[in-house]
């Protein structure tokens, strides 16, 4: 049984985006392995609070990451 854990900032995804991400990740797993695994593929999206995630020794918030993406 595949178990895929995805960590995202809290409130980064809405309900529809979460559902789409779960569906597409499951599709990718079954495409690479076997369609038989679809029913037992678990995808867990864990939300991380702002400031509880860091890179290079610096705590980050969702706004910080969005700024990095614009650079």
Image (spheres, helix red, strand yellow):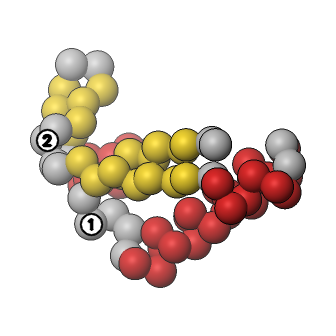
Q: Which residue is at a point 63% across and 67% down the rendered structure image?
A: 23
Q: Nearer the viewer, residue 30 or 64?
A: 30
Mark 1 or 2, nearer chain start: 1
Q: Is residue 34 visible?
A: yes
Give the crowd class for mark 1: few <14, some 14-19, many >=20 residues within 10 Å: few
- Per the rendering, the mark at residue 27 is none
Image x and y of residue 3, in percent:
55, 43
Extreme residue toward the top, this view:
57
Q: Is residue 60 above or below residue 28?
A: above
Extreme residue toward the left, this view:
51
Instruction: Give the side of residue 45 with respect to residue 42, left or right.
Output: left
Residue receiving disc 1: 11
Q: Which residue is at a point 33% across and 63% down the rendered structure image?
A: 12
Q: Quadrant of the C terminus?
A: top left
Q: Is residue 69 visible?
A: no
Residue receiving disc 2: 51
Image x and y of residue 37, in percent:
75, 52
Instruction: Give the side of residue 33 with respect to residue 44, left or right.
Output: right
Report the Cα–Cα distance between label 1 and label 2. 14 Å
Q: Quadrant of the N terminus?
A: top right
Instruction: Give the side of residue 11 with respect to residue 49, left or right.
Output: right
Q: Nearer the viewer, residue 18 or 39?
A: 39
Q: Secondary structure at mark 1?
A: loop
Image x and y of residue 22, in percent:
56, 63
Q: Which residue is at a point 83% across and 43% down the rendered structure image?
A: 33
Q: Secondary structure at mark 2?
A: loop
Give the crowd class for mark 2: few <14, some 14-19, many >=20 residues within 10 Å: few
Instruction: Give the side of residue 24 with respect to residue 35, left or right.
Output: left
């Amino acid at each position: 049984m595949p178990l895929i854990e995805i960590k995202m900032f809290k409130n980064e995804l809405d309900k529809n985006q979460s559902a789409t991400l779960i569906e597409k990740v499951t599709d990718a797993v079954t495409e690479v392995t076997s369609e038989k695994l679809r029913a037992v593929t678990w995808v867990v999206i864990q939300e991380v609070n702002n400031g509880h995630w860091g890179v290079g020794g610096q705590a980050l918030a969702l706004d910080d990451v969005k700024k990095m993406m614009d650079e």
